[in-house]
Image: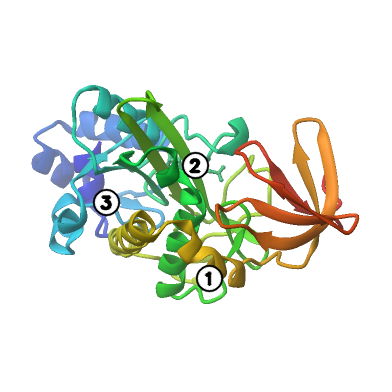
Amino acid sequence: MLTLLRLLEDGRFHSGQAIGDALCISRNAVWKQVQRLESELGIALNRVRGRGYQLASPLVLLNDAVLRDKGLSDIWPFHIYESVDSTSAEATRLVAKGVEPPFLVLSERQTSGRGRRGRIWQSPFGVNVYSSLVLRVQKGARQLEGLSLVVGLAVMRALRASGLDDAGLKWPNDILVGGKKIAGILLELTGDPADVCHVVVGVGVNVNMANAEGIEQPWTSMKLELQRMVDRNEFVCVLSRQLHEHLSRHAELGFAAFQEEWESNHLWQGREVMLASGTQRIEGMVLGIDRVGALRLSVGGVEQRFSGGEISLRLRDDRRA
Ligand code: BTN
């Protein structure tokens, strides 16, 4: 199916005969592949008698050669998939098979994309970026301090470098534009923390997604904000460069070096919020973060600190259930 998509990627009409010739398959087999593109990958096609098939909306596929050309392989080795359950699950399997970190896993779609707090991350084919970077944890737990917040900063910088000047952060690691979520981060540890251990840094960015069903919170995409298609190959490289730069600085200096920069980009600094952790609900005002990335809240005039992956935060005046 990917070969057929690569042919259609130019946005022109291709006759059934021409596609059949290029793919060395019959016109009937072409028809079946077109059906599969629509039913399995959700890709809409125009069919016009006498002209053939055309993509209903433009698509920029991830391209190994283009990514190499743009320098991605100089940053870290990468693996591209047409479809996986989750790039983070695949990254973990590759580690188990003996693939040496650091490396990056990218996919055109995820069939079971994982979000924070057990949520599903919508991952339609060919429109967004789903990436998982595997790093070896060498310095024990200290290497992980504030790591997800630093990744958030790197993603925010990549979005700003791509024209989204008002991208900002929401603790712990959501990236918002105009109050809507545009990217999410999920860190997962694999292996034995006391022995050889890896962290899988999963990053999902809504790039060219224009519609989606079943996303529980307000969301946006680069395309919706910029009013144009974004070259996903280019964005993967911009993102990787930012990640590499931020992660190197974090490994060298620790999270304290980012604390101020992070706070100055926190969209909810000084806001009244409600924090939820399991069945617990706490209301307070955001003071900032501490030297390891924990949230500092003023609760009834007293500072309290919170950290942990299961915590969620919302504005106190946000009336959504
Ligand atoms: C969140 O809920 O905000 C975190 C979303 C993280 C999604 C990314 S997409 C790439 C990687 N693979 C996954 O299954 N999840 C992460």
Quadrant of res 32: top left
Of residues 226 and 78, the one drawn nearer to the viewer in this rendering? 78
| Residue shown at 19% from the left, 31% from the top | 99
| Residue shown at 17% from the left, 50% from the top | 64
Q: Is residue 220 visible?
A: yes
Mark number, residue 95: none
Mark number, residue 62: 3
- Residue annotated with mark 2: 186
Quarter holding the C terminus is top right
Mark number, residue 261: 1
SS of the residue under disc 1: helix
Quarter holding the N terminus is top left
Q: Amino acid at mark 3?
A: Leu
| Residue shown at 49% from the left, 49% from the top | 148
Picture coordinates of residue 156, whole percent (x, y): 48, 64
Q: Tag 1 or tag 3, which sits nearer the N-term?
A: 3
Q: Is residue 178 left or right of residue 277?
A: left
Q: Residue furthest right?
A: 300
